[in-house]
Amino acid sequence: MNVEKISALTLKVRDMQRSVIFYRDVLGLNVIFGGEHAGFSSLCTRETQHTILNLEEGNPIKGWGRIVFYVDNVDTCWEYLKGKGFDPERPRDAAWGERYFHMLDPDGHELSFARPLG
């Protein structure tokens, strides 16, 4: 058996409307199922063949792991999120060959925004 790709990842969120607004309006993901007033929503990047992010209303679990989003420019993304009132860590270069920073979503899930160096 060989796993071909990860189809979806599901996060528990306390407030669907707040979470959909964050992932859709702040991060630019597209809602492909559900929405602000649903109990379950699915979002994806513009490239719909990529992994789907599902949001399920419930009790969020903090500290479970991290979602890594590749962005076109890490520093520009950091400035954008700072300008939206968020408090992301400062961008830095990693030994494994990426520039990245971390921040928390509205439910405390850790997000990483990264780009390969070079």
Image: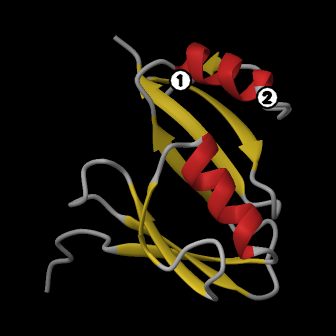
Give the Cα distance between marks 2 and 1: 17 Å
Type of residue at label 2? Glu
Which secondary structure lies at badge 1?
loop
Is residue 86 left or right of 51 when viewed as pictured? right
Residue at mark 2: 89
Percent position (x, y) of residue 54?
A: 51, 75
Residue at 71% x, 29% y is 81
Type of residue at label 1? Ala
Q: Earlier in the sequence, mark 2 or mark 1?
A: 2
Is residue 71 left or right of 89 when viewed as pictured? left
Looking at the image, is 112 positioned above or below residue 7? above
Which secondary structure lies at badge 2?
loop
Question: Please, which residue is most extreme toward the front here?
Answer: 37
Percent position (x, y) of residue 69?
A: 49, 44
Q: Which quadrant of the structure image shows residue 115? A: top left
Residue at 60% x, 14% y is 75
Quadrant assignment for the N terminus: bottom left
Residue at 60% x, 54% y is 23
Is residue 75 left or right of 64 when viewed as pictured? left
Residue at mark 1: 95
Which dot marks residue 43?
none
Q: Describe the colour scheme in one phrase.
A: secondary structure
Q: Which quadrant of the structure image shows residue 20? A: bottom right
Q: Looking at this view, is 100 or 17 the one in front? A: 17
Quadrant assignment for the C terminus: top left
Q: Which quadrant of the structure image shows residue 112? A: top right
Q: Estimate how packed mark 1 is, as few (under 14), some (14 to 19) or many (20 or more) residues with alpha carbons within 10 Å.
A: few
Q: Looking at this view, is 95 or 56 the one in front? A: 56
Residue at 76% x, 20% y is 90
Q: Are marks 2 and 1 in contact (CB under 8 Å)?
A: no
